Amino acid sequence: MRLRDTLRTLLLLAALALSAPTALRVSGQAPSATLTVISREPHRPIPITVQGGRELVALEDLAVTFQATFRDDTNSLTLSYKGRTIALTPDQTIASVAGRVISLPSPPVRVNGRWLVPLDVISRALSGIYDARIELRRQSRLVILGDLRVPRVTVRHEPSGGGARVSIEVMPRAVISVARETPDRLTIHIDGDAIDAAWPGGQIPGIVLGYRAIDKTTTAIDLGPKVARFKSTLQVGDASNTMVIDLQPQDGSVPTATRPLEPAPPPPVASVEVPARLASGSGVRTVVIDPGHGGDDRGAIGPAGTLEKDLTLTLARRLKSAIEDRLGIRVLMTRDDDRLVAVSDRPALANNNKADLFVSLHANGSQRPEASGATIYVADFPKSVAGGTSTSARPAERLLAYGGMFRDIELVTWNLAQAGHRDQSQALADLLADEFRDRVPMTATPVEQAPLRVLQSANMPAILIESGFLTNPDQERALNATDFQSTLAQAIVDAIVRFRSRPGQPHP
Amino acid sequence: MTGRRTAIALAVGVAVMAAVAGVWVGLSETPPGVAPAAAPPASVAAPAVDGTLGPRIKARLFYVAADGQHLTEVEQDVPYSNQTAAQARTILEAQFAPVTAPLVSAIPAGTRLRAVYLTPAGEAYVDLSAEVNHAHPGGLVSEMLTIYTVVNALAVNLPSVHDVQLLIDGKEADTLAGHFDLRRPLRKHLQLVVAR
């Protein structure tokens, strides 16, 4: 995995070198990596400094990159952009973003005269004052500014029948072109403004010698002398498409380097167009609503006796009606009466019905009645999970299919299914927090990550909404009010509408 | 003569306790790369402690913060043990002891510590009685506060403990109150700790 990350970084740096040869440096502090900002302009690097296991960036660098003004006053650090301001305080994990309070995982720290802040400042704070969309892809160390198409590209290769099979998965779907320009090079072009690619490390002797970035969206596969021909096949999935390239030796036997190359059976250029807008009925077609708790599991209890399990069922029914009325799409519920549903069965229902969104509804509880506000959660995974959370996919497995053929299927580790959807889930949560603003009281940190059992197995974007604290008497009254429930439901529907209208999302 | 012996005994006792505390402070240093707690520990309104005589250490115990959404820490004397597993038990027993206002414990009433196991790899297995589940008030935040009260109490006070796995009534549990994944060991969560 580390080798793959290294390759990803190298490819990004190579792409960076093509467009932005001048790199910023942190004086006196060796940056350990680089965050790459992708926009319509040439790519820009922001040095990352790792301290205490946490990745940090300098406020001065953010100011330069985002054309903001940085001020370092006594006990106050501010970044201003077009009249909107982020205010941070040394040693404080709370920040003000255009008047809203957010929390950060760590406070600003001064290193070699520069103020360093966690990467979350980009996604949580800068996005609140900037006038273009900002997407932080922490894993690949990318920041995407504006409505650019930067598909994620995951590549695997393995020996196969004396040759090799290379599978290139692109998500969301984009046009993939494969061409053999010279006998020793196959070029892969993926339509987009840039690509977020992870290419495999290592070689397959005589077949695949390596991968090289040609430009921001084109990569070359260096072929070994054993490759006689290639065959490419496109597999179109719901959210991604995968180009499977079979690199074949001569006659299925081990060829010699001097054997002349035969023309490949398929055309030398295989380009498959994927429609930018999908057919009617695609996109967000099925939503699964999960009313939390039920049966013997009452959940939180309000001081006036409201049970969380009853409230979540009421909210779920109201939300189901609102989605069906306004969007006309299929809505399933994990329970529609007062019964206990095992926590693992809830995402299983969504997975088995190929749902496009999973929304779990809850009401919060605290040992103190003062706690107040709604919070939206996305899944996190404990650090101890083997292999981390970089991917939920295992190598494809070949199964015998009807007629003696073989079929490759991608296996998804059930407990980590959500890992591949975290960015989408985060995007949905951020949109919902935006919709809640001015409508639903929220906690100081309206979007949180936690290792929540019900989300981790969901194989689609998934969020858990704690709609308020049932243990707070005022909030208990509000949560029981029909008007407030309708407001909650409408805000969730509005967020779903915005989510499916995002660039790169398939439209119905 | 008796008075002099008593004074000497007291002086020796104080010296031993000071030495033990010094050793403990050395052992309890925050490892490199770990952010310090958000607030210095308070030393007031500590819960009732065991009256057993003998050396003691300062432990950082965790209670529900005033906002109801975080933990706050309180420094308290607990009996010293030269064995880590025994020390883990004394810390958790102090953590589980009933408290009075203004402190609020996130540990459900009646919860007992059944056992603590430590592995050479730095994992602690804490076996709690079923009350931690049956008597839990419910809600995600309260569940999280209960879990990290236990996890932080061990991982903050015992430098050799890195991960804490909770067991309920001797068995692994999916969750404590329906939300938080308990199937794997957890690390300490200092971001959840705020000033009193």
Image (tube, coloured by chain):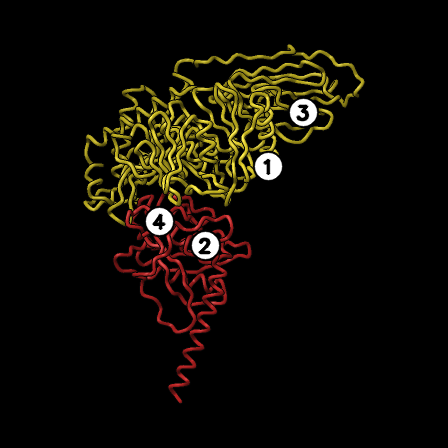
The first of marks 4 and 2 along the sequence is 2
Q: Tell me the kind of residue under disc 2.
A: Ala
Disc 1 from disc 2: Cα separation: 28 Å
User: Would residue B111 be seen by someone viewing this image from the given angle?
Assistant: yes
Disc 3 from disc 1: Cα separation: 23 Å
Image height of B38 relative to A18, above or below: below
Chain of residue at mark 4: B
Disc 4 from disc 2: Cα separation: 17 Å
Residue indicated by mark 3 = A164
**Chain coloured yellow in the rendered structure:** A
Q: Going by the image, does A304 lie left or right of A31?
A: left
Q: Choose between B107 and A23: the one closer to the eye.
A: A23
Which percent across, then down, holds residue A62? 45, 31
Within-10-Å neighbours for mark 2: few <14, some 14–19, many 20+: many
Disc 4 from disc 1: Cα separation: 35 Å
Residue indicated by mark 4 = B194
Identify the image quadrant of residue A94.
Answer: top left
Which percent across, then down, holds residue A278? 43, 14
Discs 4, 1: same chain: no
Q: Which of marks 4 and 2 is in front?
A: 4
Chain of residue at mark 3: A
Residue indicated by mark 1 = A2
Chain of residue at mark 2: B
Q: Which of marks 3 and 1 is in front?
A: 1
